[in-house]
Image: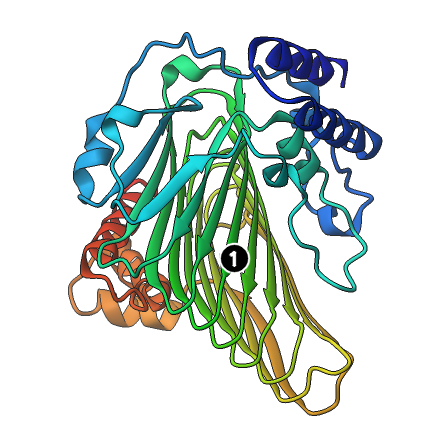
Amino acid sequence: MDHLTTQLKQYISSNSSNNNIIKKRKKALAEFIKYGFPKTNLENYRFTNLSKLNKLKFFLPNHTIKNEFNTKIEDDIQFPTLYFLNGRFLEKLSKVPDFISIESILNKEENFQSPFGVKYDASANPFVYLNTALINDGFLIKITESINEPLRIIYKMTAGSENLMNHPKFIIKASKNINATIIEEYHGENTLYFNNVSTDFNLDLNSHIKHFRIQNESSKSYHVANTNYNISKDASIQSTYIVSGSNLHRHDINVILNGSGSHIDLNGLCLLKNSQHIDHNIIFDHATAYVTSKMLFKYILSEKSTGVFNGRALVREDSQKIDSIQTNNNLILSKSAIMNSNPQLEIYADDVKCTHGSTTGQLDENALFYIRSRGLDLLEAKSLLINGFANEIINEISNKKIKEYCTDFLENWLGKLN
């Protein structure tokens, strides 16, 4: 913990910041130190061991890293994009529409406030405090007009990022009656680093956002994230998560449905191999009456990988006429892979329609036999069945370019399976 205190002191001494922000940073770090890195005796971290992360030392970027960039990512799909390399914003490569306002997250005190909380959730997320203390880059993005093309955020780590840690924060605010698409991507070359990301979405009346989050980082890296959706009356979020990278991935997703007619549709596809560990902890807070939610997360686990899914739907006392569906389906490709699934309902109202379910299984031997009888070899037959399982998520993507991008992503991952 002394190492983190030293990092904060060095950051403050080399960056201009007002005294109130410095106080907020120091207070947040003190809160993180009080909690420490979560241990497995906490219910929300029961199946996620962070002991290795606790023993490692990471350093904030000093902005002297060589300016490398792999243009392959840039060329995949051409959309307005904010580029980040090794914790640094690349303004020359970035371009956004004029009517989208972006401003650095570092200069305003309100950006250092903790994100909104979920009622009935007494647990603290220490990584939110750590992000607040050590924020080193990020933007407040204000969308005041509907966007025809997606706005893309690419966060890239290269081989020159060994032992770096980044704590970016993004706040996306959509005005009334907005339609927009946000793509949030994290990529990394094969080196050790730590990303601790915080992303907040605030949707005003009758705004509709499609959010795609793609994580394909180094197999040596650690990726921790906290995403918050605050959804107002008649507004909606349609979100798709594609996760395949990092040695350890922990993502806390908090949703507050704050106005009648608000809705969220959250889909996730997690692709695990080797000894990767992917953990999602999701809370839907149905904070008022007449709101709806739908959640579908799928994991595909191979080799010695492990997965965790905790999904909780909260319905408050006066939140009547709720319709909520929560599903977690998991496909195990190896006898050594382990999946821990825990869908939950916590309901304090009586006029609601809430369901949840979870399945975990292997490829159907009869289906494999049938496909092979049609002339395909074993590997081709398995790939066909896995594709069918995964494509329920990808087929929900309406944007043709993004759908093709995610399909290629899946095919590349399948091609590397043994």
Quadrant location, the N terminus: top right
Q: Is residue 94 left or right of residue 163?
A: left
Q: Residues within 10 Å of mark 1 (few under 14, many from 20)?
A: some
Identify the residue position indicated by label 1 in the image.
202
* Amino acid type assigned to the residue bearing label 1 in the image: Asn
Rendered-image quadrant of the C terminus: top left
- Tag 1, which secondary structure? strand
Say which quarter of the image contains residue 55: top right
Query: From the viewer's perspective, is residue 323 above or below residue 182?
Result: below
Residue 250 versus residue 158 in the image, above or below: below
Q: At x 62% / y 9%, what residue is drawn?
A: 13
The residue at 69%/18% (across/down) is 4
Where residue 307 sits: x, y (%)?
Answer: 57, 50
Whether residue 284 can be seen here: yes
Position in image of residue 134 (x %, y %):
62, 25
Which residue shows up at 70% across the image and 11% down it? 6
Q: Nearer the viewer, residue 241 or 210?
A: 210
Q: What colouring style does the render use?
A: rainbow
Q: Vertical placement of 316 versus 130: above or below?
A: below
Question: Left of 119 or right of it: where is 331?
Answer: left
Would you say residue 333 is visible in this rendering? no
Is 210 located above or below residue 1 in the figure?
below
Q: Name the residue furthest bottom.
A: 351
Q: Viewer-proximal residue, 149 or 412?
A: 149
